[in-house]
Amino acid sequence: MARAAGTVKRVTLELGGKSPSLVFEDADIDAAVDGSLYGAFNNTGQSCDARSRIYIHENVYDEFVEKFIAKTEKLAVGIHSVRQHIWVQLSIKPSWTQ
């Protein structure tokens, strides 16, 4: 960062990933599920801020996990622009036609 500052370069620092989602007891569970799904599966999880862990308050754990699994089972793999219901994009071009 010090080297970049001397010549006013833009700098992005990678902080190691492993970003968790936190679900508190008073959370809107449906919104937490949607946000956690997006955080984990957007761009096939190939992002430095992709969610790799979810910490859930014990009082809402069962409800969250049930809804999370139900939505995860409905995810389709493919190119997002081809069909509206697809969340996950493939990064490997030959796979786009499959």
Image (tube, rainbow, N blue to C red):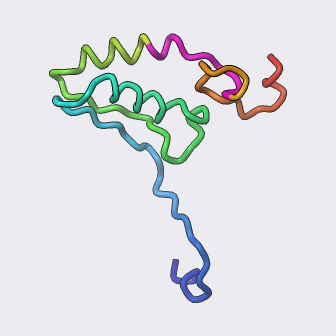
**x, y (%) of residue 88?**
61, 27
**x, y (%) of residue 13?**
51, 63
Left or right relative to 37: residue 56: left
**Which sits in the foreground, 5 or 26?**
26
* Res. 10 image quadrant: bottom right
Check the image and name the residue furthest to the front. Answer: 84
Span of residues in magenta: 71-80
**Could you tell me how many numbered marks the image carries?**
0
The answer to whether residue 79 is magenta is yes
The image shows residue 39, relative to residue 95, as above or below, that is below
**x, y (%) of residue 68?**
39, 18
Left or right relative to 13: residue 97: right
* Prevailing secondary structure class for the magenta stretch in the rendered image: loop
**x, y (%) of residue 28?**
26, 28
Q: Which quadrant: the C terminus?
A: top right
Residue at the (72%, 34%) spot, across then down:
91
Residue at the (52%, 77%) spot, across then down:
1
The image shows residue 82, relative to residue 47, as above or below, that is above
Left or right relative to 11: residue 95: right
**Which sits in the foreground, 21 or 34?**
34
* Res. 21 image quadrant: top left
Left or right relative to 6: residue 82: right
Check the image and name the residue furthest to the bottom. Answer: 6
